[in-house]
Image (cartoon, rainbow, N blue to C red):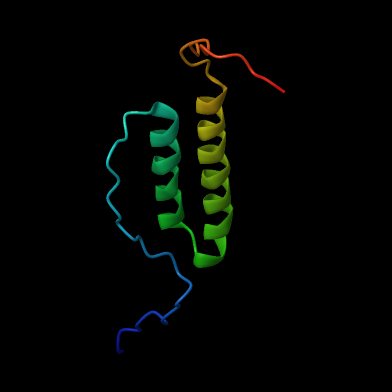
Amino acid sequence: MLPVEPEYDPAAPAPLNVSRAPTGYADVDAQLDRLADADHLATDGHMEVYEDVHRGLRDALTALDARPGPPVPPTTYSSRS
């Protein structure tokens, strides 16, 4: 009996093995690590992971904007109409 080779399936999971360097921001690093979840899914499952990561990165950026920054120095001129 001849060995049976598995049928080629272009949609089968194939890890991309993209290296991810830590950014130093825990929220961002967690989202980038989440991208590895797509390595174990068929291509039709990637979109859900990508959308989730995009949403998480957008939330992390929004949180940075929400942090209070240093006080703005007062202007030395008055506004004239």
Pick whichever, 10 or 71, lies toward us.
Answer: 71
Q: Residue at the location (50% across, 66% down)?
A: 43
Q: Residue at the location (51% across, 32% down)?
A: 60
- Vertical position of residue 7 compared to residue 46: above or below: below
- Vertical position of residue 79 compared to residue 44: above or below: above
Residue 9 relative to residue 21: left or right: right
- Vertical position of residue 79 compared to residue 41: above or below: above
Pick whichever, 65 or 22, lies toward us.
Answer: 65
Q: Position of residue 34 (x, y in %)?
A: 44, 43
Residue 26 sits in quarter: top left
Q: Residue at the location (52% across, 52% down)?
A: 50
| Quarter occupied by the C terminus | top right
Q: Position of residue 58 (x, y in %)?
A: 55, 39
Q: Position of residue 18 (x, y in %)?
A: 30, 55
Q: Position of residue 62 (x, y in %)?
A: 56, 31
Across the whole image, how many numbered discs are drawn on residues? 0
Q: Residue furthest bottom?
A: 1
Pick whichever, 73 or 31, lies toward us.
Answer: 73
Residue 4 sits in quarter: bottom left
| Quarter occupied by the N terminus | bottom left
Q: Residue at the location (39% across, 79% down)?
A: 6
Q: Residue furthest front?
A: 81
